[in-house]
Each structure stands twice: as C-alpha cells, then as structure tokens.
Image (cartoon, rainbow, N blue to C red):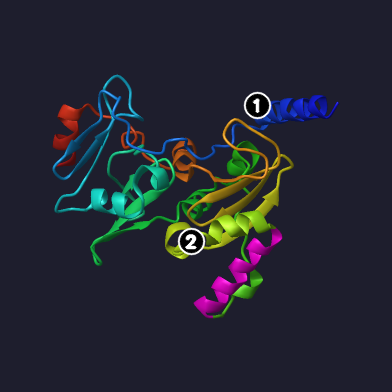
Amino acid sequence: MRRRVLRGITLGVMVWLTVAGFAIAESPTTAISSTCAADFALSDGHFFGQTGIEGSGFLVHDDSEASFWTAFNAYGGVPALGYPISNRFDLYGFRVQAFQKAVLQWDPARSKANVANILDNLQAVGADSWLQVYRQVPPHQSLPGDEGVSFDVIITNHLALLDVNANIRRAFLAETDWLTRYGLPIAYQDFGPVRVMRAQRTVLQEWIVDVPWARAGEVVFANSGDLAREAGLFPSGAVQPRLPSSARAAEA
C-alpha cells in the first residue's frame, strides 16, 4: 500500500513538473568526457563539445585578454561549473563566459575571474516572474535590515535566511568560500515537491520526493547558467557553438 502511495506521489510530481516547467537541476556531468568527438586539450585550454552539436562546441582558454581556463580549473572544473554553454561575450561591462552552473566574469583590474551575480542580473532584467512560475525560483527579496548597515551585518542578515531549512543550510555552508562561490542567500520558498533557496549566484533545491536527478531529501544546485541562457539574458550569438577550426579565430 505504501509503495502504491509513493508511486502516486511521484507521478503527481512529474505531472506538476510538466505543468510548472522543468526545474533545471544539477548536471550529472562529473568529469571531462573522452568519448565526445569534439573534445580535446590545448596548450592553453580545452575545447568542449558536450554542449555543442555535430562536432561543434565551446573553447575555454587563457590569453592576454582573460584566463578563463585557469579560473575554470581553480573553481573546480566540470564537477563545480559544468560544461561551457557560451563563447566569451560582454555582459554588464565585463568579459564573461557562461557554464551550465555558473557564469565567470573577468576582472582586469585584479587579473582574476569572479563568479557573476547571475541571479541578481536576472532580477534586474525583470525575469523573476518567469523564474518563479516556470523554474521554481523564488523572487528576489530585499531585507529591510540591510538599510544603512555594514556589510558584515548584511552578511549576518542573509545567512539567517538559511535557518528555515537545515539541509540547505548544511549544503550551502559546506563550501568554505561560500561567499565567493554562491554570494549571499536572497530568498526561500516551499513549492511543495521542492524547497528552494535563491542566492546571488546559484539556486539550491531540496527535493521532498524522488525525481530522476535527486533522491528525496537531497539538496542539489540548479544550473544557474542554463537558467540565464533560457531566460534570454545572453546574446544569441554568444551561445552559438562553433567548430574547433573557427573557435580560436573567433576569439582572437
């Protein structure tokens, strides 16, 4: 009887996902694939074909403009950022490159790449309603206690948002440099089958029932780069995969 009930719940969740929109969850990629035809190492980077089509893909490399390949590896490579989903392009005054799980932006003054506040960018272009309805991401929340206080107090205010969900809090703080990687927690919402914490640079999902990409009670990180691409934040030309022969020339 219990198995029948659980099966009914799971079916209901899948119907809900179909109606509400597929919540983009953590990519299952864990390592660079050697089976993809358009996947090979270069002296200063790597060409990835996993997110391209028919031998096309995206180049991640270092040059005099930016060291995205070095940054990609420093942040944990494919397991942490996923595969590239764009070429280099300009976004809000920064040279950036998007990956499935994050967007890296180059800071020329410090000669390093930072993780962009991509969820803040989506809020700025008015995408919050779409995110909430179709991708189960709560809208941006401004905290009254942030007005006129130091950044240390702001950090404390936003960390308190994690107290509503112990599992999400544990997953968030498991990253020792969470502020650099995830930014501040911004908003929380219980959608029923999934409980979601929005941060400046990522989205954490605690699934209440089993789904294909997570077990009940498991916390996963949504693909925030994919969310931004789907919401139309990136120029169409930037997300167009290139053939290996043209990728280097286009970046020059």
Q: Residue furthest right?
A: 1
Image coordinates for residue 132, horizontal then vertical, percent: 63, 43
Residue 157 lies in what quarter of the image?
bottom right
Magenta span covers which residues? Answer: 150-164
Image coordinates for residue 159, horizontal then vertical, percent: 59, 67
Residue at mark 1: 18
Image coordinates for residue 88, horizontal then vertical, percent: 27, 43
Residue at mark 2: 183
Residue 128 appears in the rendering: yes
| Residue 169 forms part of the magenta stretch | no
- For label 2, count other residues whose C-alpha is less than 10 Å away and answer few (under 14), some (14-19) or many (20+): many
Dominant SS type (magenta): helix
Q: Secondary structure at mark 1?
A: helix
Nearest to the observer: residue 95 or residue 52: 52
Q: Secondary structure at mark 2?
A: loop
| Residue 154 forms part of the magenta stretch | yes
- For label 1, count other residues whose C-alpha is less than 10 Å away and answer few (under 14), some (14-19) or many (20+): few
Residue 249 lies in what quarter of the image?
top left
| Mark 2 or mark 1: whose residue is earlier in sequence | 1
- Residue 119's disc is none
Nearest to the observer: residue 186 or residue 206: 206
For the residue marked with disc 1, what is the amino acid? Thr
Quick one: quadrant of the N terminus?
top right
Q: CA distance from mark 2 to mark 1?
A: 30 Å
Going by the image, does 236 lie left or right of 173? left
- Number of marks present in the image shown: 2
Quick one: quadrant of the C terminus?
top left
Q: Is residue 235 above or below residue 241?
A: below
